[in-house]
Image (spheres, helix red, strand yellow):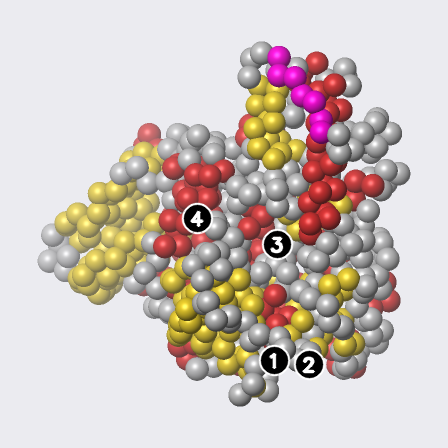
Amino acid sequence: MKIDRRKFIKLGGGLFGSYVFAINAPLTAEELKNISKPTNIRKFTENKIAGISPFCDKTMTPKRLDCDVLVAGGGLAGICAAIAAAREGAKVVLVQDRSRLGGNASSEIKMHPLGMHHNNSGFREGGIIEEILLENLMSNPQKEWEVWDLLLYDKVVSEKNITLLLDTDLCGVETSGNEIKQAFARCDASRTFYEIKSKIYIDCTGDSRMAAEAGATLFDGRDAPETYGEEFSGYDPQGTHQGSSILFTSKDFGRPMPFKAPSWARKITAENIRHRGIDKNRLEYGFWWVELGGDMNAISDSEKLRFELLRVVLGAWDYVKNSGKFPEAENRAITSIGMLPGRRDTFRIKGEYIFKEQDILGNWKNLEDAIAVGGWSMDDHPKEGFDAVNRAPCRQIRKAHFYNIPFGSLISCDFKNLMMAGRNISCSHVAFTSTRVMLTSAACGNAAGVAAAMSAKLGKTPKEIRENKKLLGNLQQTLLRNNQAIVGVKNQDKKDLAKIAKVSANTAAKDTSAQNVISGSAFDLKGEYKNRYIAEISKKPVLTLSWDKPQAVSQIQITFDGGNRELTMTSHGSYLKSIIWGAQPEIIKDFKIFGTLPDGKKEIIADVKDNYQRLFRLNFPAKKLASIDIELLATNGNSFARVNEIRIY
């Protein structure tokens, strides 16, 4: 079969090459009902230009890889997708075009990953991303971005089912009908060309590269206000985007550190930043509002954007150092500056469901296929970014503290074995301004990975899983079991022996009950104590689960209360002040687990010390137990012991 490389461009400029758009066929009436047809939908056209190499040149060594799940893109969404699929038993290939993982959260860009406004919601996204963030707080007390990079690398390569390909670009896709048959990737550093055949493909590239190469339908930038009938659409013209940013870090060296800007740096005046104030107490990290390119193409214009963003960053630092308005900066010098613009907004992939503003504002409660939570504000930025001197650098609309994201927004409507996670999920641009943030992207990646592994194992397409209530329920239950937050979905796992146990405790506090640990939910909304057991640690609390008849037990899982504060990797002073760098005080540090045998003899099953993770899972050879006692001996600093959920298998 001949392989045609697929490419397309933005209006007037190339994205991956100098080829043209084809306008996609109109959406059906069922999809948009009384809503106008979007005119910002794009589809790649097949490359009909003769003489184009089919991706591999004569100096490369070809290599064939077979897997269950191919994940393209190694940002936080891709990392979580790969790990989640691997832990469900799938054989995974993760392709990343950079030498390090993390995407916008890597040391190359240094954007701290954010997500729901948990101070308003009372809970976080949970899942694999929470595990990673808790690990970083323990293993990276020096708060170094390169150590964070290494941690992400370690989390991926420690999974035996993942093959990681760094410095490798996904460069093509072979399709047949509505199915992806294989993908192509090339590593110019090692001169290796990969043919990768997978059962399920997940596009976590952010820029929708895999979907574009396949010819899937993409959304390009902002929608017209009439497209989805969204109240907050129309912030900027249709087809424009949010911009890209370059960040820097600085340090106080205790002595004067002169700075002279290069001749090509922009000259920044007070007029340029009158809506973008510089906080004299936050000069260690910045500035997110150094943003450009929403009226350009963040991909094809990347070199121009890099240069212009560096001009602005260095000009802004020149203003800080030499305007005389910031004596606090006298001893400060830049210690790092990004050379890779962090992209916010390029292309989204049309899915089985288009998530919209109305869903964020309440319709999410009617979506039965919830798989992850979001909660960032609807945060739009002017297309001119920094050059919009007469406009605020962003518009933040906080009308929803949290919402569920549907599985349908992670499934391509064009290809039966293509999924997506990250800032390219299927949504309107208004919804995108909330879902685009990295912790939300990571939670979607977690869900996509579990679903992909399930799809590969069962021989069912993601769409078939979504449309089958039993299979969809199994997906949701697997995510809950792995500490992923989904609002309103309860633990209904019939294999969970804790649900049929009698639960008691020798002490309790704050009007909580031992029964709360089998309430069906592992998190509380703000101000609630329905799904937590709390007791004073000084009273040596013991939780007991017992059965009328002994049960064969081989796994004990405990979800602790992880607190409700920021966990992110960051260099930003205000975030650093709110973060406890180390074990979170609320998490139980030391505890023992005892099992009572059918003859009444009690034996120790586990003596755990120095725990700092929210989710604890212990596997052991099956044994018949009449009861289980969990002695809570010490927290990581809090005076109260807190347990959200206990599961027994």
Q: What residue type is labelled 2?
A: Lys
Q: What residue type is labelled 4?
A: Leu
Pointer 1 with pointer 2, Cβ within 8 A: yes
The kind of secondary structure element at disc 4 is helix
Q: Which mark is residue 374?
A: 3
Q: Given the image, on which type of amino acid does mark 1 rest?
A: Asp
Residue where numbered disc 1 is placed: 4
Residue 259, magenta (yes or no): yes
- Whether label 1 touches label 4, CB < 8 Å: no
Instruction: Mark 2 and mark 3 in contact? Answer it, CB < 8 Å.
Output: no
Q: How many labels does the image show?
A: 4
- For residue 624, the mark is none
Q: Residue at x 38, y 44 (%)?
A: 613
In the rendered image, which residue does mark 2 sit on?
Answer: 48
Q: Whole-Å distance between the Cαs marked 4 and 3? A: 22 Å
**Category of crowding for the residue at label 1, using alpha-carbon neighbours closer than 10 angstroms: few (below 14), some (14–19), many (at least 20):** many
Quarter occupied by residue 68: bottom left
In this view, the residue farthest toward the right is 390
Front tag of 2 and 3: 2
User: Magenta stretch?
Assistant: 256-262
Between discs 4 and 3, the one toward the N terminus: 4
Question: With respect to residue 31, does 407 lie above or below?
Answer: above
Viewer-nearest of labels 2 and 4? 2
Expressed as whole percent of the image width and height from the top left, the position of residue 557 reads 33, 54
Q: Kindly report the distance in space between the C-alpha atoms of the residues bearing marks 2 and 3.
A: 42 Å
Q: Residue at position x 73%, y 68% from top? A: 18
- Closest to the observer, 392 or 207: 207
State the CA–CA distance, disc 1 to disc 4.
Answer: 35 Å
Q: Give the labeled residue for mark 4.
A: 152
> Disc 1 vs disc 3: which is toward the camera?
1
Q: Earlier in the sequence, mark 1 or mark 2?
A: 1
Q: Does the magenta stretch include residue 544?
A: no
